[in-house]
Image: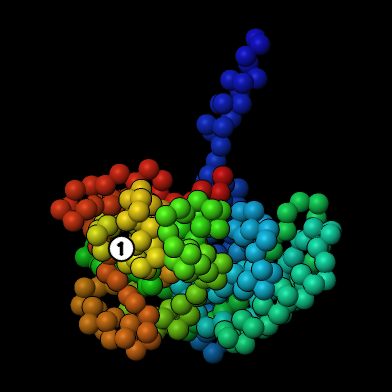
């Protein structure tokens, strides 16, 4: 009997529910009709004048989503921007947000002043304003949450569930920068020059919500979400909700010069582009005939759009090389539990 506790702990660990299993089991039964079964990143509530309100909430935790010595203004901006990215992925226009802060008791006013200044700067940039919220103290790490509100024409929000066989898969911007940036901040990205490391760290700390792009993709994109937990895993969410399969062509992944240099130095770092989180680029599917229009839109907005794969009948997501051979991806994306 001496070993029973260890065996019990191992059994419990093996049965531990992941994030989406927890949501499905405990919270989905509580969801309102507009909550989309809690399987998208937003809820939709009917509003006046043929509009729908788009609601989303995201939290960031010190030591998990940002580092303790990150500049407080950038922490505030990351917090707001990850929520704006969810609105962008539905094609929504920002309206306002609620803020909840749980800060360590010793966090001083200078930190709060810089944090508020970061929010003020991004409010001006993204035409959004604070509506209210709550604040409390904690003996644990700083935990920060925003609930963002946007609006979109009724029935026009781009959900995760609209992908169809024959669609092409696109992403905005470049992939893997944020995951590599976190490695740089932790001193784990050896062999890369300081300028490249600084670029990657900035991409981790300051995501760029693609609001203008998301709004212009309404009516063209069939399914869309932002990449927060990793490309393979997030395309898996689209495939699952759409009842289709997805194929990613690894050779087509858009990489920044800094990320490319990091991957050349260590090819195993390609995993950052496939399964690293925090890029907050838009991932969407569109019919093949939309290619010319998407190229024109990318040029107009100055945002790179890359076709990286396709949607096909079936289920799941596979990654292939330039010859079509399957590549193993040990981890599809970030897991919270």
Depth check: give the residue in front, 206 or 9: 206
Direction from residue 205 to residue 317 in the image, left or right: left
Outermost residue on the left side: it is 323
- Identify the residue at horizontal 63%, vertical 16% (top origin): 4
Q: Position of residue 43 (x, y in %)?
A: 55, 68
Q: Is residue 261 visible?
A: yes
Direction from residue 114 to residue 259 in the image, left or right: left
Compared to residue 32, the image places residue 210 above or below, namely below
Compared to residue 190, the image places residue 261 above or below, namely below
Q: Position of residue 140 (x, y in %)?
A: 76, 51
- Identify the residue at horizontal 58%, vertical 30% (top origin): 12
Depth check: give the residue in front, 95 or 65: 65
Compared to residue 130, the image places residue 107 above or below, namely above
Q: Answer few, some or many: residues within 10 Å of disc 1's Cα (few below 14, many 20 plus, some between 14 and 19).
A: many
Question: Which quarter of the rendering shows the C terminus?
Answer: top right
Question: Which quarter of the rendering shows the N terminus?
Answer: top right
Direction from residue 321 to residue 12 in the image, left or right: right
Q: Position of residue 184 (x, y in %)?
A: 51, 57
Q: Is residue 160 visible?
A: no
Q: How many marks?
A: 1
- Identify the residue at horizontal 26%, vertical 47% (top origin): 327
- Residue corresponding to mark 1: 253
Give the structural element (helix, strand or loop) at label 1.
loop
- Identify the residue at horizontal 56%, vertical 32% (top origin): 13
Q: Position of residue 331 (x, y in %)?
A: 41, 45
């Amino acid at each position: 009997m001496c070993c029973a506790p260890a065996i019990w702990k191992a059994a419990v660990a093996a049965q531990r529910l992941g994030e989406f299993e927890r949501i499905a089991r405990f919270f989905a039964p509580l969801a309102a009709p507009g909550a989309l079964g809690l399987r998208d990143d937003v809820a939709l509530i009917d509003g006046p004048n043929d509009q729908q309100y788009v609601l989303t909430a995201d939290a960031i935790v010190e030591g998990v989503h940002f580092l303790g010595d990150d500049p407080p203004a950038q922490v505030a901006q990351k917090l707001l921007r990850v929520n704006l990215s969810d609105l962008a992925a539905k094609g929504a226009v920002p309206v306002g947000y609620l803020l909840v802060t749980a800060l360590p008791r010793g966090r001083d006013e200078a930190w709060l002043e810089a944090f508020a200044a970061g929010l003020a700067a991004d409010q001006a940039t993204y035409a959004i304003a604070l509506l209210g919220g709550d604040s409390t103290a904690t003996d644990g790490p700083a935990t920060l949450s925003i609930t963002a509100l946007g609006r979109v024409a009724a029935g026009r929000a781009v959900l995760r569930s609209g992908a169809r066989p024959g669609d092409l898969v696109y992403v905005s911007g470049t992939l893997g920068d944020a995951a590599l940036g976190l490695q740089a901040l932790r001193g784990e990205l050896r062999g890369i020059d300081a300028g490249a490391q600084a670029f990657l760290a900035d991409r981790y700390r300051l995501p760029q919500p693609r609001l203008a792009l998301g709004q212009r993709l309404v009516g063209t994109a069939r399914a869309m979400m932002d990449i927060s937990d990793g490309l393979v895993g997030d395309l898996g969410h689209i495939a699952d909700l759409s009842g289709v399969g997805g194929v990613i062509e690894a050779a087509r992944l858009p990489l920044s010069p800094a990320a490319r240099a990091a991957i050349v130095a260590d090819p195993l770092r390609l995993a950052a582009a496939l399964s690293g989180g925090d890029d907050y680029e838009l991932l969407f599917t569109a019919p093949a005939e939309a290619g010319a229009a998407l190229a024109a839109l990318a040029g107009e907005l100055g945002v790179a759009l890359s076709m990286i794969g396709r949607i096909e009948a079936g289920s799941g997501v596979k990654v292939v090389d330039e010859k079509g051979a399957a590549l193993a991806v040990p981890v599809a994306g970030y897991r919270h539990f």
